[in-house]
Image (cartoon, helix red, strand yellow):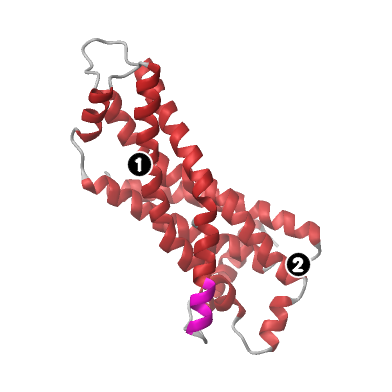
Amino acid sequence: MSIITRQIQIMGQYYLLMYRTFSRPESWKMFRQLFFREVENIGIGSLGIVTIISVFMGAVVTIQTAANIDSPLIPSYSVGYASRQTVILEFAPTILALIFAGKIGSNIASELGTMRISEQIDALEIMGINSAQFLILPKICAAVFINPFLVIISMFQGLFGGWLFGSLSGVVIPSQFIYGIQYGFRPFDVTYALIKTLVFAFLITSISAFHGYYVRGGALEIGKASTRAVVSSSIFILLFNYIITQLLLI
């Protein structure tokens, strides 16, 4: 089987899986329970890493920006402006998505892979339950729902980290940094970031679920599926990051 044929087959499997996934839940009560459980796992479980990464990345962006501005013709508030644009447009939605691909994506792939290997998915199918909808749809809906909130939190934390460490290190005057954050602000930048976040959340969960759902073999294959899920999700995040940027910002 050629590489092209294999890729077409994989794409067909993915679309068929998504078709089965996006069907009407057989039990809305069970769906709500699974949905809120996934919101807790994805949202609450990721707050710690989001906070740590956002604060320190905001600090690094601020210090590096200030260190590379040598010309007296460039106003000092440009440090806050550049930090704001970097955090809102690229860091918060895209870098966090790549991190989520490793944290959430690998977890989804390994969870579904384990269920496939232990024949739990086969048991659901025997009972007449749509296993794709039952297992995957709550994860996708939860990620699409909670990830924008995590990104908004990351934006504030990144700018706070830039202000705090920039002030403590003396590379920027706090009032000038805050003025730079406010200077020329466009609400559409936040909208653009949230649009990317919704797309990335869907890609991470659906691609990772696909790789876990179709695992065949033993425990070793679960690890390979998790790796493929992270790599594939990261590639598609970068690809769609370019496409969305081309469509919305240019």
Category of crowding for the residue at label 1, using alpha-carbon neighbours closer than 10 angstroms: few (below 14), some (14–19), many (at least 20):
some
The residue shown at (41%, 63%) is: 145
Residue 96 x, y percent position in the rendering: 47, 45
Give the camera-side residue of 100 and 54.
54
Residue 63 x, y percent position in the rendering: 40, 21
Residue 125 visible within the image: yes
Q: Amino acid at mark 1?
A: Phe
The residue shown at (23%, 48%) is: 188
| Residue span colored magenta | 28-34
Residue 159 x, y percent position in the rendering: 35, 35
Q: Nearer the viewer, mark 2 or mark 1?
A: 1
Gap in Å between the C-alphas at discs 2 and 1? 43 Å
Quadrant for the N terminus in the image: bottom right
Q: Is residue 180 shown left or right of residue 140?
A: left
**Which is nearer the N-term, disc 2 or disc 1?**
1
The residue shown at (49%, 38%) is: 53
Magenta span contains residue 31: yes
Q: Main secondary structure of the magenta part?
A: helix
Residue 204 visible within the image: no
Q: Which residue is mark 1?
A: 156
Q: Amino acid at mark 2?
A: Arg
Q: Is residue 212 shown left or right of residue 20?
A: right
Quadrant for the C terminus in the image: top left
Q: Which residue is mark 2?
A: 216
> What number of labels is visible?
2
Magenta span contains residue 33: yes
Residue 243 x, y percent position in the rendering: 38, 50
